[in-house]
Image (cartoon, coloured by chain):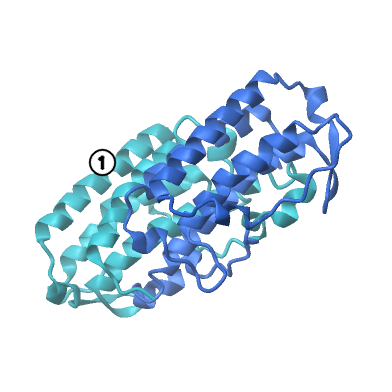
Chain colours: A cyan, B blue
């Protein structure tokens, strides 16, 4: 398995907003607004969550390393009050803008190997390193891309008829935690 | 659950090559060439498979409806001999070009509701409708996007440390069939 590499992480984080934009912008709402049932998320909800995380989660936590402060608890539903009246296009723009600003700040920190080993206290998981948090930022993008593709495939669960047994995304039990 | 809608299917099929291009082009090879272990696929392999399916699977099968012919067996490893010496960038270009050509041909067929109910024989699944095949084309894109995001997240399984329990893509058992 691979060790964390900051440049690899940044390469991925740079691409996610563009990839989601290419996949989702102006797509029929059947794909973007439907979810997997009560208390589950649509692609729209996931983009709102990703934008919210850019604002309140990743960089605010990065800034806490080395200060002896514990992270605040993260509200997995925090995005819900922010999306009122917004379109998917607006959320995609917001996600892209916030991500770009955050990566600019991250690069300016000029982190070295010894900085990546700094530790901070997570309210649930205990002590974590800055390296682990940054790797998680990238893996969190991928987890939500994984979720979006599953949620969208679910909309065609009946439409594909007997092909459903060949489609892995339809056999995925939705093991993603909501956030 | 949603019935099949041809315009929704085409909307999605149009976007997949652009989305994969935005996610994968020029990404470090750690993300694109690594897989989940022996006999599993990397993101590179998945793109090769998608391009191969454009050439030998989807439109050739679409053309068979109404002719009383059974589909040929599909070779899940068929792409392997075609990728020798190709770069990921070349495969992404090839996938985009073939998809665009195929969607042009599909649109020119001007399919109506009664055409979508036509049936053909699948070598394993039995009788399927054209509507089911077209819905599967879209859901197959999503299944492989789901697979790519899982395979890439897997590369950071160790790097994320204790955060792994919050990352759904790391709890996905790899239920995708190889193809």
Q: Is residue B114 left or right of residue A140?
A: right
Is residue A150 shown to the viewer in this render? no
Q: Residue at x 71, y 42 (%)?
A: B1
In x, y percent, where is residue B140? 62, 47
Nearer to us in this view, B87 or A60: B87
Up the image or down, A52 lies above or below B33; here it is above
Up the image or down, B40 lies above or below B103; here it is below
**Label 1 environment density (alpha carbons within 10 Å; few <14, some 14–19, many ≥20):** some
Query: Hey, which quadrant is residue A100 in on the image?
Result: top left
Nearer to us in this view, B150 or A94: B150
Q: Residue at x 73, y 52 (%)?
A: A164
Residue at which label 1 appears: A97
Q: Is residue A87 left or right of residue A163?
A: left
Nearer to us in this view, A121 or A26: A26
Q: Is residue B84 left or right of residue B39?
A: left
Quarter placement of the N terminus of chain A: bottom left
In x, y percent, where is residue A40? 56, 53
Query: Hey, which quadrant is residue A172 in on the image?
Result: bottom right
Is residue A159 shown to the viewer in this render? yes
Quarter placement of the C terminus of chain A: bottom left
Residue farthest bottom in this picture: A127
Q: Chain of mark 1?
A: A
In x, y percent, where is residue B72? 78, 46
Q: Is residue A54 left or right of residue A86?
A: left
Q: Residue at x 17, y 68 (%)?
A: A64
Q: Residue at x 60, y 30 (%)?
A: B102
Query: Hey, which quadrant is residue A133 in on the image?
Result: bottom left
Label total for image? 1
Up the image or down, A25 lies above or below A124; here it is above
Circle 1: element type: helix
In x, y percent, where is residue A47? 42, 45
């Amino acid at each position: 398995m691979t060790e964390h590499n900051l440049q690899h992480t940044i390469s991925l984080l740079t691409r996610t907003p563009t990839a989601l934009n290419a996949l989702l912008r102006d797509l029929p709402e059947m794909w973007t607004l439907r979810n997997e049932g009560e208390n589950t998320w649509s692609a729209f909800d996931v983009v709102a969550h990703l934008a919210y995380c850019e604002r309140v989660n990743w960089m605010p936590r990065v800034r806490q390393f080395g200060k002896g402060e514990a992270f605040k608890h993260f509200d997995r539903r925090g995005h819900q009050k922010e999306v009122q009246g917004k379109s998917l296009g607006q959320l995609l723009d917001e996600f892209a803008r916030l991500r770009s600003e955050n990566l600019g700040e991250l690069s300016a920190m000029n982190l070295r190997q010894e900085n990546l080993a700094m530790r901070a206290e997570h309210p649930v998981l205990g002590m974590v390193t800055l390296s682990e948090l940054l790797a998680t930022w990238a893996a969190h993008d991928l987890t939500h891309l994984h979720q979006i593709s599953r949620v969208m495939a679910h909309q065609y669960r009946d439409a594909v008829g007997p092909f459903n047994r060949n489609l892995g995304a339809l056999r995925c039990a939705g093991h993603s935690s909501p956030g």
